[in-house]
Image (spheres, grey):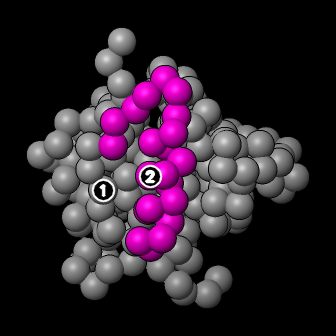
Amino acid sequence: MNPLRIVLADDHAVVLAGVRAVLERTEPPIEIVGAAQGAEELIALLDRVPCDVLVTDFSMPSPSDHGQDGLRMLQTIRRTHPLLRVVVLTMLDNPSILRAIREMAHGLISKRSDLRELPAAVAVVGAGRSYLSPMLQAALESESGRLETALTARETEVIRLFADGYSV
């Protein structure tokens, strides 16, 4: 069996190194084939390096990314690499933003979760299934009681602005 080929992305070098260290100890083995520290760098990497699963931070601000927020980044990745399985790591806990991310990612994990959760999530997503961190599932359920709520275009735009640092 060939190992899962993984690309990692996070704008914090320490987080990137930690995620790499956790995943490299995974059984069955995986192969880290690349890493990026910004959305623009990530999209360029995905265009040249084949991989099975992307593990990425949701919000990676960078002056060179030309306003590429997390939602736009995920939309671009889904459009240009439709078969790529995506796991998003996030510190966000706003239910509206989490629902928007879930629409575009196959896996969603809180950065506050236990480290052992990450390899399990990657394995589940790599096998073609979806994964939602129990911590984030609880946040979603406590807010609305419903996990599946489609957002309007205007709601999505408000979430983008919120994620960019604007106040509600």
Q: Are marks 2 and 1 in contact (CB under 8 Å)?
A: yes
Q: Earlier in the sequence, mark 2 or mark 1?
A: 2
Asked whether, in this view, residue 38 is left or right of residue 14, the answer is left
Placement of the C terminus among the 4 image quadrants: bottom right
In the image, 64: left or right of 31?
Answer: left
Count residues near mark 1 (Cα–Cα under 10 Å), then give few for <14, some for 14-19, many for 20+.
many
Q: Is residue 142 above or below residue 159?
A: above
Taking the spot 48% from the left edge, 70% from the top edge, the residue there is: 14
- Distance (Cα) linking label 2 and label 1: 9 Å
Magenta span includes 124 = no
Residue at 61 percent of width and 87 percent of height? 167
Magenta-colored stretch includes residue 19:
yes
Of 105 and 57, the residue lying toward us: 57
Q: Which residues are magenta?
A: 12-32
- Residue in view at x 57 percent, y 37 percent: 119
Dividing the picture into quarters, in which one does residue 12 lie?
Answer: bottom left
Tag 1: residue type? Ala
What residue is rendered at 44% in x and 52% in y?
A: 20
Residue 20 marker: 2
2 vs 1, front mark: 2
> x, y percentage for residue 53?
38, 37
Q: Image check: 140 left or right of 54? A: right
Q: Amino acid at mark 2?
A: Arg
Q: Which residue is mark 1?
A: 35
> Which one is nearer the viewer's eye here, 92 or 150?
92
Q: Find numbered disc 1 in the image and state the secondary structure of the residue it sits on.
A: strand
